[in-house]
Image: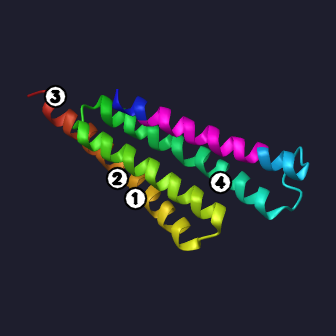
Amino acid sequence: MITALYASLCALLLVKLSLQVISLRRKHQVSLGDAGNAELQAAVRTQGNATEYIPITLILMMLLEWATAAWWIIHLAGIALLTSRIIHASALKTGNVKRRVLGMKITFFLILALAVLNIFYLIAGYFFAGS
């Protein structure tokens, strides 16, 4: 399972982002919410954004892998996922809007591409299963 590698790497990224939130909560003595602190708001949204987009992307990758897509497609998707999430996370931390948009564009394109590929493999499976 190639997807397991990227799921594990994404899990490590999520832990890192969570630890950043915890560290900032301690630093600013905020137990819940963000208390209007811009640095904490950015960290919370960075973590939240990752938890919103990583799972669906990994599910689509796993389904594509189960559909016997070429191994290089799964690796390419995993590399794109990690790269996009790291770009996005670093951009939110530094306030670089252009890099943030780049990270989101890569993520959205990847999700769309994986969805289309899954539909293609599903339809192809129906047509060629009876042959």
Of the numbered discs in the image, which one, if any, rests on residue 129? 3
Q: Are circles 1 and 3 on residues that touch, CB within 8 Å?
A: no
Q: Are circles 1 and 2 on residues that touch, CB within 8 Å?
A: yes
Compare marks 3 and 2 and give the one earlier in the sequence: 2
User: Which residue is tagged 4?
Assistant: 46
Q: How many residues crowd around disc 4 within 10 Å: few (fewer than 14), some, or many (20 or more)?
A: many
Q: How many residues crowd around disc 2 within 10 Å: few (fewer than 14), some, or many (20 or more)?
A: some
- In this picture the colour scheme is rainbow
Residue projecting furthest to the bottom: 98
Of the numbered discs in the image, which one, if any, rests on residue 120? none
User: Which residue is tagged 1?
Assistant: 109
Q: Are circles 3 and 2 on residues that touch, CB within 8 Å?
A: no
> Alpha-carbon distance for marks 1 and 2?
6 Å
The answer to whether 21 appears left or right of 28 in the picture is left
The disc labelled 1 sits on which kind of residue? Phe
Compare marks 4 and 2 and give the one earlier in the sequence: 4
The disc labelled 4 sits on which kind of residue? Thr
The disc labelled 3 sits on which kind of residue? Ala
> Alpha-carbon distance for marks 3 and 2?
23 Å
Task: Report the front residue among 83 and 65.
Answer: 83
User: Which residue is tagged 2?
Assistant: 113
- What residue is rendered at 21% in x and 38% in y? 70
> Alpha-carbon distance for marks 1 and 4?
19 Å
> Alpha-carbon distance for marks 1 and 3?
29 Å
Percent across and percent down for residue 4 are 42, 29
- What residue is rendered at 41% in x and 40% in y? 60
In the image, the segment drawn in magenta is 6-22
Q: Quadrant of the N terminus?
A: top left
Question: Please, what is the dominant secondary structure of the magenta stretch?
Answer: helix
The disc labelled 2 sits on which kind of residue? Ala
Compare marks 1 and 3 and give the one earlier in the sequence: 1
Q: Of the residues tagged 3 and 2, which is closer to the observer?
A: 2
